[in-house]
Amino acid sequence: MDKDNLRQADVARGTGIDRSYLNRLIKGTARWNQDHIDKVAKFFNLSSSQLLENAKSPGTPGATTKPDYQLFDAEILRMSLDALEVFERSIPLKILPARRTCILQKLYEHWLVEKERPTPELAKKYFFHC
């Protein structure tokens, strides 16, 4: 980790994520979940969406445009988070974390099966299923 001369060990300590597991997340051999994203985002004083958007800035792995079938898990999660946030802004209540995680999981599973990008309409559908 290069930003501000941070080491993975510093981020692991600051987030409470096991150092070896954080290394696997960064290398892409382990899957990110909402809890990991939230912890790392909080560590860097970013929202979850900002963290995922920063991961896609030019010069970072995966920053190029790819066909849908080649999208990485983090990209699908970012699109799912974006769709969920748009849906959340359209309703007059706050979605509890457990339901939010369930919706994100359903959006991701929908992508795996249908290869259909997450949308606020799908988030609404899964809001009522979770």
Image (cartoon, rainbow, N blue to C red):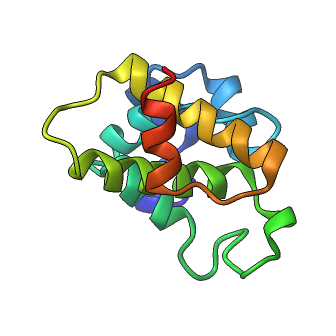
Is 107 left, or right, of 37 in this rendering? right
Name which quarter of the figure residue 55 lies in: bottom right
Q: Nearer the viewer, residue 67 or 38?
A: 67
- Above or below, 18 relative to 25: above
- Name the side, left or right, on which 46 lies relative to 31: left
Q: How many marks?
A: 0
State whether residue 14 appears in this view. Answer: yes
Depth check: 65 or 113 in front? Answer: 113
Where residue 95 sits: x, y (%)?
A: 28, 29
Residue, x 45% and y 24% (percent of image)?
A: 13
- In the image, is 122 to the left or to the right of 70? left
Residue 33: quarter of image:
top right
Query: Picture coordinates of residue 100 (x, y %)?
Result: 41, 29
Work out which residue is located at the far left of the displayed protein and give it: 92
Q: Position of residue 96 (x, y in %)?
A: 29, 22
> Quick one: 32 or 44, which is closer to the camera?
32
- Quadrant of residue 113 within the rendered picture: top right
Residue 81: percent from left, percent from top: 46, 49
Q: Nearer the viewer, residue 130 or 61?
A: 130
Residue located 85% across and 65% down the image = 70
Q: Is residue 9 above or below residue 44?
A: above
Image-based side of 124 in relation to 1, left or right: left
Residue located 38% across and 44% down the image: 41
Q: Is residue 12 visible?
A: no
